[in-house]
Amino acid sequence: MSLEMVWLLPMSLMVCLGLLPGRFADRKVTQIRKVVTGVATLHLVVSAIVLGIGLSTSLPAGQSMQQELASAGMLAPTVLLDGTSGLMLTLVAFVGWVICRYSIRYLDGESQQGNYFRWLSLTVGAVSLLAISGDLLTLFVAWSLSSLGIHKLLTHYSDRPAARKAAWTKCAISRFGDVFLVAAGVLIFREFGTLRLSELFATVQSYHATGLPGNSLLPSIGALLIAGAALKTAQFPFHTWLPETLEAPTPVSALMHAGIVNAGGYLLIRLSPLLAWSPLAMTSLAVLGALTACFAAAVMLTQTSVKKSLAWSTIAQMGFMMLQCGLGAFSAAMLHIIAHSLYKAHAFLNSGDVLNQAAATRGAVKNQPAGARAGFVTLGFSLTATLAIYASVTSLLGLDLAAKPGGFLLGLILCLGLTRWVWQLAMSRQPRAVPLGLATTALLCAAYVLSFLAVDAVIASGVSALAVPASTGTAIVAGFVIIAFVALLTLESWLSLTPALAWQDSPRWLQVAYVHASNGFYVDAAFARAVHNAKS
């Protein structure tokens, strides 16, 4: 390994620590967890330094660094460092470090915590390697290692049947996803004669000037990559395993929901120059993502368990990220990965404080007026004000929504989410609530727009400048998404206005829908039955 590649040493050590024998790790618990946590800390520091150096020099200018790790000709493993991989690497290192630190206290006293830490080390190291892989073969190997590591972590409590079932279901679905990815890799090698990302991107970029060859396999390649990523990101109806993984230790759930499940989205962002030439597949991905997001959000509203609610929230967020990718908004999808990872890691690791959080919000709920008419009038005012604020902020900060793929649609969805916040404050009847809500909304809009512009500038060399936004069926997709998200906002607001004791007076169809939604519309039962029939 050359001197300039020394920054790869921490993640290499993390992968190597995962190869230690389990019995040895359990006998040396104190040493293993100290070493793993120490290496994770070093990994975070080095990743942040590398990203900082890259951002301050060549990365924003569209440069990248690809280098072989070994001399093996065409099959030599390579790493590719640019804005996209640098951001993802730092994010993985940070989340991994937080989970390592949290796990020390969470698993203290358990007999197999040494074995747990070695698999945690392997998983974080493998996902880090996935983030910076410079060729498809290295990417697939890293993905396989991360799948092995998370499978072992999900079955940490091997005496729990539910944990084993969820882990094996995820493993089976992921292997189907691997089939699509391998098929895409075969077609890529047949089309380009290489698996190296920098060479692939250079060839695809030349198609912007010369046009796509008539016999090109790129549309099929894009469709296969999208299918593989969708299977790995818990998209409907292959989402059933994710809520069942909650039998694993809480830090494992945090790692799964904040990191591993995002890998499919990162794959689409990383390979976005290849996807844009398959507009039908992109449109299908947008529809599937929107369906998954709305379906999971409706189920999430009915859950009484905080961890179940977080699990369905993850499915909804993954659907929304697939929607962004399907619209060609890869910079927005990258920002979504960063924000969702940080939020979901905090939410899971802080899930034990749910009683204090509920007590803090109880005062706002009890001050809401009972009248639904007044509530919906206030909701309309909140939406109008939020849209005006967002339009003003984007204009002030120079964000041209028309120039960004899915800009207006994604902006509207953001406003619908912020409307819920403004509405809750307005309904609290506090004198300063409305001014505070509007001011906070303006700050949140500004923070989002600035973050988007920053991420877009950082990853432009690998994504935005090469990707061609999907256009087929955009109007139909946009109409479906708008209706679905407005309906969700209306439903959630109506549920907030309806006291729990009044459910018996609500329409019969709504009571029935609530029961079905609380059971996930029985998709998991249908999926399990289909798997059982296939086995028999």
Image (tube, rainbow, N blue to C red):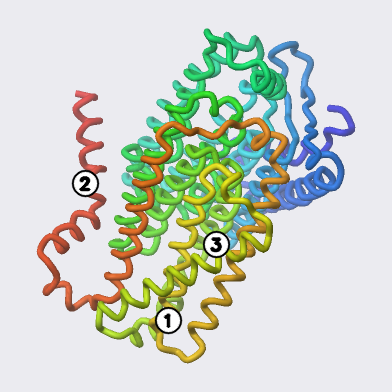
Residue type, label 1: Ala
| In the foreground, 212 or 330 | 212
**Residue in the picture at 68% in, 43% down:** 89
The residue that mark 1 highlights is 426
Q: Quadrant of the C terminus?
A: top left
**Residue in the picture at 64% in, 54% down:** 399
Q: Quadrant of the N terminus?
A: top right
Q: Give the mark nearest the N terminus, 2 or 3.
A: 3
| In the foreground, 51 or 153 | 51
Which label sits in the foreground, 2 or 1? 1
Which element is circle 2 on? helix
Residue type, label 2: Tyr
Q: Is residue 45 left or right of residue 525?
A: right
Q: In 3D space, how far apart are the residues under numbered discs 1 and 3 (Cα atoms)?
A: 27 Å
Q: In 3D space, how far apart are the residues under numbered discs 2 and 1 (Cα atoms)?
A: 37 Å
Give the class, few, some or many, for how many residues have Cα within 10 Å of label 1's Cα (few <14, many ≥20). Answer: many
Find out whether the residues at labels 2 and 3 contact each other: C-beta distance under 8 Å: no
Q: How many marks?
A: 3
Which element is circle 1 on? helix
Q: Is residue 231 visible?
A: no
The label on residue 522 is 2
**Residue in the picture at 31% in, 58% down:** 487
Q: Give the mark nearest the N terminus, 1 or 3.
A: 3
Residue 530, image x, y percentages: 22, 31
Res 379 → quadrant: bottom left
The residue that mark 3 highlights is 346
